[in-house]
Each structure stands twice: as structure tokens, then as C-alpha cells.
Image (cartoon, rainbow, N blue to C red):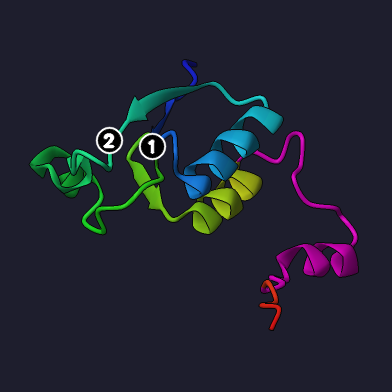
Amino acid sequence: MEETQLKLYSYWRSSCSCRVRIALNLKRLKYEYKAVNLVKGEQFSPEFSKLNPLNFVPALVDGDIVVADSFAILMYLEEKYPQHPLLPQDLHKRAINYQVKPFQIKK
């Protein structure tokens, strides 16, 4: 059985894309990097719009499945590829990881 090749549509300066690349590497998953140059507007090309009508990166292709949005991609990877988990097994510790702490503006 041949392993499905993951494809990550990404931009090198995108922090959202960076977190997905980190997760793929921590999980030791092989993937093909597909550069989408946001400065040149490549996210609005007909080819990319057909793949991801939201027109933003990152977008992960896993066979026939396309997942956009870094958080959705991380959750997808965690469920489909449980090896080398990104999150702790303990429910409380996992919930803490889901929390987003907004930065505070100093006045």
C-alpha cells in the first residue's frame, strides 16, 4: 500500500504556515512543500482558488481532502496521524493548550 503524499501550500513568511510546518516535522510526516507567494498574489490564481476558495495559506492536501486554516490542519493531523502526538493525553493539560492568551497592550 502506497503512502499518500501530503502537500502543504504555504508561504515562507506566514506564521500560520510555519506552525503547520513545525507540526508536520514534529510528527515526522513527509510532505511536499508548494510555495504560494502572497506578495505576488498567487493565492488568487485560478489553480489555487479551485483548491482553496478561501484564498489563504496554509492549505493541506491529503489525498482527496483539503484542509485550510492552521488550527484546523493541526487538529486534522493530530486525529489522522496520532503518532508523535502534539498534545498531552491528560484532558486538563490538553484544554490548557487550546487556550489562547491575547497579548496585553501596555499603556
- From the viewer's perspective, is 82 left or right of 53? right
Query: Looking at the image, do the residues carrying marks 2 and 1 touch, with CB atoms under 8 Å apart?
Result: yes
Q: Residue at x 66, y 25 (%)?
A: 28
Residue under label 1, please give it: 11
Q: Residue furthest front?
A: 107
In the depicted view, which residue is nearer to us: 4 or 72? 72
Alpha-carbon span between mark 2 and mark 1: 6 Å
Which percent across, then down, holds residue 83? 73, 34
Q: Disc 1 residue type? A: Tyr
Instruction: Give the quadrant of residue 8.
Output: top left
Secondary structure found at label 2 = loop
Residue under label 2, please give it: 37
Which percent across, then down, holds residue 66? 35, 46
Q: Which disc number belongs to residue 95? A: none
Magenta-drawn stretch contains 88: yes
Q: Which residues are magenta?
A: 81-102
Secondary structure found at label 1 = loop
Q: Residue at x 46, y 16 (%)?
A: 2
